[in-house]
Amino acid sequence: MDSTYAQQVLATEQARIQDYMSVFPITFLYWDYLLTLSDEVQYFWKLPVGTSTVLFFLNRYVSLLGNFVVTISLFYNFSTESSCQVFHTFRGFLLIVEEMVVGVLLTVRIYALYDRGKRILAAMLSVGCILVMIALFTTLFHRSESSDKILPGVDIGCHVAISFALSVQQAAAWEALLLYNVMLFVMMLLKAHKTHHELRPLRIPLVDIIVRDGSLYFGVMAIANAINISTFYYPWPFIRASLTTFASSMSVTMMSRLMFNLHKVADSGLYASHRTTIGTHSTWPEFRVEDEQLNYDE
């Protein structure tokens, strides 16, 4: 009896930690939304509907609305294990949709930086499709015998213990995403280095090019995902995968911030090239007119 009680207390403590790890990133997501709402009105609400704006709103509001449901669930008393399992499944699909939208945005950004090269796009799509299939297979179709377990005896919230075998399978999906993020991050750095070499007479610091083109946003997303992946191998079952909301919220926030900064530079936004972003500094030659003659966003 004492052993069972001790296990129940430990599981309850883990469940509370799980809640905290969900509340913080969701709070950060909504806080950043309020901070940038005026920018959203200025740079997106008044624009004609195009690819960049549609992707922005998908990235922004799928996460905001979906995490509203997640927030409610943290304080909701689930009457049955089946209802908790339904919510757990919903949360999994929400994460998949969020990361797929972010992946499309990242791909479009690299496509623009590489002058809309068809070979680059084909290569990214090929790698992306392979990684998506791996992620979907490990997440949806290859569940182990020892699956999720609902935590009983907790008054509120839906807390799921993930077996180590299942956790490793699910980690593969996030590892595939991390691989894709790192690949795109390296591509951005290589492009920034090439641009820095081409514009050497202008003496533009390489760091400035990296910052203005959004490479740092890619890096932050990759780091957040790497931290998230580490929790899948944690020994406590209720702590495993507890930072998935953190990773997805950081990805959504970073992509929103990137798109705001790009739209401040040019109406083409996500499709802005190196020439456009570099041309924003007052001491540098202006390349904006040449780039904006091509209306990519329509």
Image (cartoon, grey):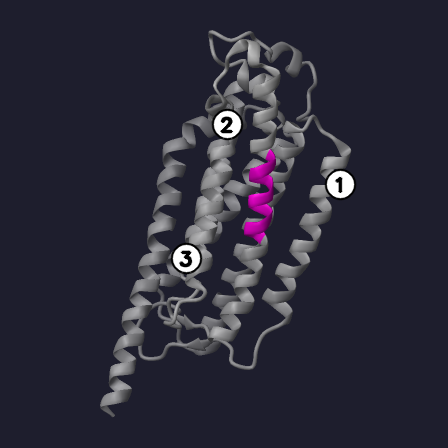
- Horizontally, is 284 left or right of 113 in the view? left
x and y, in percent, of residue 14 in the image: 31, 69
Callout 2–callout 3 Cβ contact below 8 Å: no
x and y, in percent, of residue 235 in the image: 38, 71
Q: Residue at x 66, y 26 (%)?
A: 297
Tell me the crowding category of disc 2: few under 14, some 14 to 19, or many 20 or more residues within 10 angstroms, Cα based.
many
Type of residue at label 1? Ala
Q: Is the magenta stretch mostly helix, strand or loop?
A: helix
Which one is closest to the eye, mark 2 or mark 3? 2
Q: Name the N-terminal-most of marks 1 and 3.
A: 1
Residue 154 in view:
no
Q: In this view, does 55 lie above or below 48?
A: below
Q: What stretch is highlighted in magenta?
A: 177-187
Q: Is mark 1 on a helix, strand or loop?
A: helix
Q: Residue 181 lies in what quarter of the image?
A: top right
Q: Residue at x 59, y 29 (%)?
A: 270
Q: In this view, does 204 lie above or below 114?
A: above
Q: Name the residue under label 2.
A: 210
Q: Residue 245 lies in what quarter of the image?
A: bottom left
x and y, in percent, of residue 69 in the image: 44, 56
Type of residue at label 2? Ile
Which one is closest to the eye, mark 1 or mark 3? 1
68 vs 215, nearest the viewer: 215
As drawn, the label of residue 122 is 1
